[in-house]
Amino acid sequence: MPYFGRFKINIQKSELGIYEKDTAIYKHLNLEIKEAGGYSFNKEVPFINSKSGDWKIKNIDGINYLYLVYGKGIYDLIEDEVKLSLEGDLYIINTRPRKNEKNVEKLVLTRMD
């Protein structure tokens, strides 16, 4: 599956909103999605709910979608759907932020290896 591996934030393609002014802080953000299970970001950021956790696959109408699971909320799991662009980048639309923080409209991650 093309979701597994190491990825780095693509500042130019991402839509960071209020975090645009702090790109120097976020330009080194990396994500590793392990085939055996689990994911981890290399640092905590306000616009991602959890630095690490598990992932799951949901099959919707015969198509598999990857979700990063951040934990359990009041009603259901707190998770973000990870999409794959035609260029092979991963992206998340409207990230689930940490409590009392703002989300990012589009977070784009480019494969490192």
Image (cartoon, grey):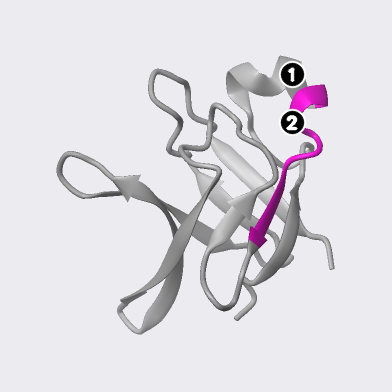
Question: Residue reaching furthest bottom?
Answer: 62
**Mark 1 residue crowding within 10 angstroms, few (<14) / some (14–19) / many (20+):** few
Q: Secondary structure at mark 1?
A: helix
The spot of residue 39 in percent (x, y) is 57, 59
Q: What kind of element bears circle 2?
A: helix
Q: Position of residue 68 (x, y in %)?
A: 46, 56
Magenta region includes residue 38: no
What is the three-letter code of the residue carrying label 2?
Tyr
Q: In the shown orientation, is residue 60 left or right of residue 29? A: left
Q: Residue furthest left?
A: 75
Q: Name the foreground residue: 113 vs 50.
A: 50
Image quadrant holding the C terminus, namely bottom right
Q: How many dots with numbers?
A: 2
Quadrant into which the N terminus falls: bottom right
Q: Quadrant of residue 106?
A: top right
Q: Pick whichever, 74 or 95, lies toward us.
A: 74
Q: Are marks 2 and 1 in contact (CB under 8 Å)?
A: yes
Q: Which residue is mark 2?
A: 26
Residue range in magenta is 24-32
State the image coordinates of residue 44 (x, y, percent, origin top left). 61, 34
In the rendered image, the vertical position of residue 92 relative to residue 14, given as above or below:
below
In the drawing, does residue 11 fall left or right of residue 86? right
Structural distance between the alpha carbons of marks 2 and 1: 7 Å
Residue 22 circle label: 1
In x, y percent, where is residue 48?
Answer: 52, 37
Residue placed at 47% from the left, 22% from the top? 102
Name the residue rendered at 70%, 21% in the picture: 20
Mark 2 surroundings within 10 Å by alpha-carbon count, few (fewer than 14), some (14 through 19), many (20 or more): some
Query: Which residue is at a point 49% across and 41% down the rendered structure image?
Result: 50
**54 lies above or below 50:** below
Mark 1 belongs to which amino acid? Answer: Asp
| The disc label shown at residue 103, or none | none
